[in-house]
Structures are given as C-alpha cells and as structure tokens.
Image (spheres, coloured by chain):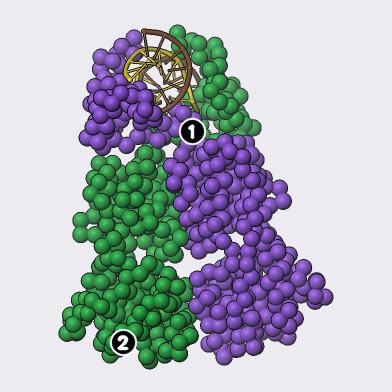
Chain colours: A green, B purple, C yellow, D brown
Amino acid sequence: MASAMNKSSTGNVKRTRKAHPQASMHDVARHAGVSLITVSRFLRTPGKVSERTRQLVEDAIAELGYVPNLVAGGLASSQSTIVSMIVPFVSHGVFAEAIQGVSDVVDAHGYNVLLGHSTGSVEREEAILRSILGYRPAGVVIQGANHSERTVEFLRKAAMPVVEIGTLPETPIGMAVGYSNHQAALAMTRHLIARGYRRIGFVGTDPATNDRILQRLAGYRQGLDEAGIAFDPALVLRSPFGIVEGRQLLHVYRSMQPMPDAVFCASDLWAAGMISECRKQGIGVPTDLAIAGFNDQDIASVIDPAITTIRVPRYEIGRQAGRMIVETIAGRSVERMVDVGFELVVRDST
Amino acid sequence: MASAMNKSSTGNVKRTRKAHPQASMHDVARHAGVSLITVSRFLRTPGKVSERTRQLVEDAIAELGYVPNLVAGGLASSQSTIVSMIVPFVSHGVFAEAIQGVSDVVDAHGYNVLLGHSTGSVEREEAILRSILGYRPAGVVIQGANHSERTVEFLRKAAMPVVEIGTLPETPIGMAVGYSNHQAALAMTRHLIARGYRRIGFVGTDPATNDRILQRLAGYRQGLDEAGIAFDPALVLRSPFGIVEGRQLLHVYRSMQPMPDAVFCASDLWAAGMISECRKQGIGVPTDLAIAGFNDQDIASVIDPAITTIRVPRYEIGRQAGRMIVETIAGRSVERMVDVGFELVVRDST
DNA sequence: TTGAAAGCGGTACCAG
DNA sequence: CTGGTACCGCTTTCAA
C-alpha cells in the first residue's frame, strides 16, 4: 500500500516539511527516465550501466546540479567518509602542519577531515570526541596520549582505526606515529651540557596536562643526572605558549640568584621571545645566556641569533597518520607504531 | 506485517551485514524498557518525559555508552550540525587562526567544523566544495572571493548561510567578513613614500589566482600613482610563500639596476627571509633597503629589525564568521558585510 | 506522558 | 544491464 502511494505520487507528495532546494537522487532518476537504483549504480559502479543510460544520467546530474547526499549514503551503507582529528589548538603552527598532512592524504582518498580542538583539556577532549563520534567517522587522529579514561574507553569501543600522534605511547589505543619527546629533550640537554652549561633552566606548560611536556621534562632531568648536575625545581618554569610569555620569562630567570647560564625552552616561541628581550636588554646570547628551543618553527632560523632547536617532521606525522587510517580501512595491515624521529639542529643561540 | 516482524524479532534480526558494536537508540530503548521514541524524546526534550523514565533512559545510555548517531539524526531531521570551512592551506598561520576562531564559536553552539583546503586552486576548491556539500552542512565559511562560476552557483543553490572571509567582495555570495586589502596596501605604500622611498618593489603570489594579492597590488599601484611615481612592472615579483623564498627574492632585487630602496612584501614570511638574508649579506635594513611585510605574524615582532607590517585580526574574522553562521541558522538577521579593519604597525624595518 | 507509523535519501541483496 | 524491496538509525506528525 505504502509503496503504491509512493509510486503514484512520485514519492514527493509529503515533502511539505520544508523547502528542499537540493536535488535528490530521486529527482535525477525521474529526470533521466530511469529508476533510482540505476542512478545510484552509475555513481557507484559506472562500468555496470549501459552507455546510453550513462549519458542520460550524466546529463540529468549536470542539469540539476545534483550533489550526492553523503549523510543518507553513509547511513545506508554504514560507511563514512569522515576522518576526525582532535588537536589542542588549531592555530598552533605545529598542529596546523599535522592537520595539513592528514588532510592532504585523506582528501586524496575521498575522505574529509572533521576537526575538533580541546584547548589542551582532557575534559573538553572527551566532550569533543563524543560529539565527533556521533558522525561515526571512518577513523580518528588524536594528538598526544594523555586522555581521560572515558575517552580511551569510547575510542576502544568505537572499533575504528585510531592514531595517536606526536608521541610514542607505551600502550597506544590503536596506532601511533610520533617521536620520543624524552629522547629529543635528552639530546638537547646533552648538547647544552657538552657546550659547558651547568645551570640550565627549563620552560614548559603544565606537565600534568601535557604528556609531551612531561616527557621532555623527564629527558631534561635524565640529561642532568647523567652529568651529575643536581635538578633544581626552581629553574623549571611553567607558562602558556607565546612570544610575549617568553619575554616575561627572561625577567624571571634574570631575577634568580645565581642566574642560569642556559635555558631549554620546550617551544621555539618562548625561545624567540627570550632572545628578542635579551637583545633589548643588552644580554648576550649565547655568551651571557644560551637559549634553546623546540620544534624548529619558522621563527627559529630567522631570528638573530638563530635558535638551536629540535626539528620534528610535523607534516610527515600527519601524512603517516592519514595513511595509516586509510590503509586500515582498506583492510591492509599497518604498523602499530611509527617513529618518525627528530633532529637536533645546532645554530647560534647555544 | 513488516512492523509485526520487527516487533517480534526486536528489529535486529537482519543485522547480519556487519558487526555493529555501537549501541543504537533501539538498544537503549530495549535496555530501559521503553519505546524508541521515548529515548529520542528524552534526548531532545527532556522536560517532556517523566522523572522515572528519565532515570531509566539515563542509566541505559550510560551503561551502553550510547552515542547518538548524528548521521541518522541529520538525515531524519534534514538538519546538520556541520559547518564546513574551506581555506587555501591549513598550515598557513593566518588561516589557522581563522579556523580556530570559527571552531571556537561554532563548537560552543554544538556544531563541528568540517575542513577542506584548496591549495589556492579554484578547481580544487570546487572539487572540495562538492564533496563537502555532500554532507549538507548547516553553513559554509570560505576564504576569499575568487571562486569558479560553478562554485558560486553551487553555493547559491545550496541555500545555506555562506560567509566569505578575509576580504570585502563587491558582490558577496551571502555574507562576508574581512577588511579592505586594497586600503591596507595603500596605507603601507603611503607610509613608505612618506618615509622617502621612491623605488618600491612588491612581492606577491600570482594575482590571477589570489584575489587578496590582486587587491594589495592595486593598493600599491594607487599609492605610487598618488605620489606621481611611475609603476615599474619589473619591480613586482611573484613567488610562493615562504622564508626561503624571501631569501632568494632578495638576490633578485639586488641584481636589479638600479636597486629598489624599499620592498613591500605581501606576507611577513618573505619579509623575514629577506631581512635575515640582508643581515647575512651585510645589507643595512632599512638604511640600504627598507622591507615591509603584511599580516603581523609572530615573526614580525621578534626579528631584528622588527618588521613594519599590517595587522589584521584573523582570529576575530573567524569568530565573526562563525557567529554569522550560527545567528543566521537561528533565524536572526545578520549583517551582510563586516569590516574588521586593519592596522599599520610601524616598526624598525622601514 | 507515551507510542505507532511514515519517512529522510540512499545502498545492498536478490530477482528479472 | 536494470529494477524491487527492505532496511540504515533517527525524527516527525498524529493518536492514544
């Protein structure tokens, strides 16, 4: 009965709920004089329709400006073309590069990136994830390995490919691509010690909410230990990211007795701010104070003196993460963990 | 008949297509001993269900870890919680900031950002848009006003709020928020001329594919005109964005006869590269060559000499765009065009 | 306050 | 090569 009604009324009679300017597959089918399923088939497996039909449908699609409804398609097929990605901040250069990497790869495979940002809070991350999981994405890329229990639980239960990026977790949820923040910080600390610096400061965000900073701090401490230098908590400063913050931090260090002879900033932005402020104050870098950074952002190579830093292939991390998602979906077996490494870039600031 | 079957078999018998680990609303309903519709109602209008039912459903949801399927919901209600955004590059600082702005605002209203990047090509932009329109987003934010005809057509036909950002188009597709690239470049050119520079170079990308660069170029030319300085096409260089590119451009300008006495770079990155290279080559800035930038990125304030540039509130642009989308959806009337202005920031490089 | 039935716009399986 | 039918998981009338 119901189907007969649909038929006789072309199935659109009841569409009074709201104006629907977008053409549907039904409209295309009618326009082309074929059945709806034929249109679907043309879109999905063009080889299985006759040349004549192909032409008819093609014309109808063009004329109507038909855009397939992925929402309906996704629901029907239980398949999604969304890859979702969660980072602390979109506008931080290092994350933006990773996003670009993921986007580049998944776009090429017909997926789109649904973006969320957690502002570095695990609670917000959990909320974002819930919301994003509502779209039943084909995969999830998430920054770091520091998540709430429920976040992890959701991710496991969702049974979709998950890639944690920017770190190498001990127990990854699914897959991971990153580098050892610990080793990178250790390498930098060793470098500073080899240069003869003994009283070395460390700048980071709150290690309790940022697993990568926590690991860098650990690497820093190991470096000190190795050299028999006592760890001095007073030399470890916490601050939000930023150049302006870096300027202020310099003054904090300057007021210390005795002053440090070097500072390892866990981000180039702080280092750049400190160097700029040193110039203003007439403090010699690295003669009076050595300053090291992390990430090798644009700023590191053009500021004077150029910043000694750790280079990490952020874009590559994104690309790898995208690839791992796509390959997993395609049913190919994929590495559980990819270490992209890092590079100590020695310049003039140390 | 069909419904009877559904009932007697709990509606899940035929679910053999694939393993479905995600709980559905149906599962929640069964678990709570209520009908499916009651669960839906609880989620949508909690005030309309009894206290007892509320408790039952709440428990079932928690126990099952149920996450509402937005795909199905969106299809049924013809409503979307996706705002899509298209920019040339995610990883360019200026776009990343705008993305963050949009994301911050729409997130707070329960929307998520679906991201696309066009690599600056109108063809790719069109392709991205088609794909993104497949999700029937609630709104679209798109960088610039330089689109293909079909892109514009699609956007108009889609009948959803559209905001073009970063520029003030003469004939916006829907709404727009930005600033006058022409006026900004004019202001900078006037500044350079007022400083006494006469032979002023200009660096941009291809104006044919970037409407903002085109307008900056026009502003630059107007500035020259006003001062009675003849426009010399040889002084206008095209280049991809980047610091390394800036270094190379310096050498191009140095090889000119006569050399320019100032260069207006339509992006700080070029300016930073040029300044850094000048330092290496022993060229005085601004004594031998004045260098101006655009965007006031981080780099501009810490490099020595600090870069004279144009500050544009990118994050604010994103926020406004997000707000305009959300307000439009809510049925409130919204400005068609928002001018966020710009600011000439005079530093030491000119 | 609660429920039944009819879709939303497609896709998958099976038959013709 | 083409079409029918039964859903995908949820929301929206309309009744009860």
> Which is more foreground, mark 1 or mark 2?
2
Q: Residue under mark 1: which chain is it in?
A: B
In what element is the residue under mark 1?
loop
Residue B19 at least partly seen: no
Query: Is B264 or A231 nearer to us in this picture?
Result: A231
Residue C7 spot, x, y in % from top left: 47, 20
Viewport quadrant of the C terminus of chain B:
bottom right
Residue picked out by circle 1: B79
**Label 1 crowding class (10 Å Cα cut-off): few <14, some 14-19, many 20+?**
some
Q: Is residue B350 above or below residue A91?
A: below
| Residue A207 seen in the current view | yes
Q: In the rendered structure, which amino acid carries the disc numbered 2?
A: Met
Q: CA distance from mark 1 to mark 2?
A: 60 Å
Do dots 1 and 2 share one subunit? no
Q: Residues within 10 Å of mark 2 (few under 14, many from 20)?
A: some
Q: Residue at x 36, y 28 (%)?
A: B47
The chain under label 2 reads: A
Question: Residue, x 35% and y 58% (percent of image)?
Answer: A120
Residue B49, horizontal then vertical, whole percent? 33, 24
Would residue B303 appear left or right of B54 to someone viewing this image?
right
Residue denoted by label 2: A259
Q: Out of B274 and B27, give the one closest to the viewer.
A: B27
Q: Quadrant of residue A158?
A: top left
Instruction: Kindly identify the residue that appears in the image at 66 percent across and 74 percent down.
Output: B264
Residue A90 to residue B304: above or below: above
Q: Position of residue A59 (x, y in %)?
A: 62, 32
Q: Which mark is residue A139?
A: none
Give the residue type at disc 1: Gln
Residue A131, percent across and down? 37, 42
